[in-house]
Image: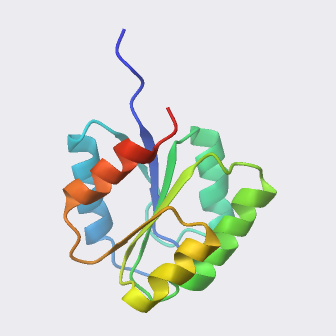
Amino acid sequence: MGKRKIRVLLAKPGLDGHDRGAKVVAHAMREAGMEVIYTGLHQTVPSIVNQAIQEDVDVIGLSIMSGAHIPICKKLMGMIKERDIGNKLVIVGGVIPNKDIPVLQDRGVNGIFPGGVHFDEITTFIEENVAK
């Protein structure tokens, strides 16, 4: 019997209406053998956390183009702690200035992928960091 596929919840939180990048990343993850649940646009943080629990995912991935990555990630990481699901790998991609990367890391975000990152970097990071 084959090993279980890595399960990824890919979400677009907030009012950001641009999801082409998220769909392309989801495709790259599927090509790498991962199971991807794409939530669609305009998700709330509580909804994302609830879906991550219901779907029993290994990874919570956020695609944020709106510039609201710091407050969204602060709320997400707080809810992850509150709901005791800290075993999930949390990654964020999108429009993220370099100066904000240490802030997100301090909040507990595991992987940060600004625009222009190659898909292989994202999939390799997930494969190397998901708790087996």
Q: Quadrant of residue 5?
A: top left
Which x, y percent locates residue 75? Answer: 68, 74
Count of marks placed on residues: 0
Q: In this rendered view, identify the residue nearer to me: 12 or 84.
A: 84
- Vertical placement of residue 105 versus 48, above or below: below
Which x, y percent locates residue 86? Answer: 67, 51
Q: In this rendered view, identify the residue nearer to me: 40 or 97.
A: 97
Q: Quadrant of residue 2?
A: top left
Which x, y percent locates residue 81? Answer: 75, 58
Q: Is residue 32 left or right of residue 88?
A: left
Instruction: Please say which color scheme the image uses.
Output: rainbow
Taking the spot 70% from the left edge, 58% from the top edge, the residue there is: 80
In this view, which residue lies farthest toward the right? 82
Q: In this rendered view, identify the residue nearer to me: 52 or 101.
A: 101
Q: Is residue 15 left or right of residue 108?
A: left
Taking the spot 27% from the left edge, 36% from the top edge, the residue there is: 33
Q: Is residue 67 left or right of residue 115?
A: right
Taking the spot 22% from the left edge, 51% from the top edge, the residue there is: 28
- Vertical placement of residue 108 versus 120, above or below: below
Residue 15 in sight here: no
- Vertical placement of residue 88 versus 111, above or below: above
Taking the spot 53% from the left edge, 42% from the top edge, the residue there is: 57
Q: In this rendered view, identify the residue nearer to me: 100 or 23.
A: 100
- Vertical placement of residue 112 versus 100, above or below: above
Quadrant where the N terminus lies? top left
Residue 26 in sight here: yes
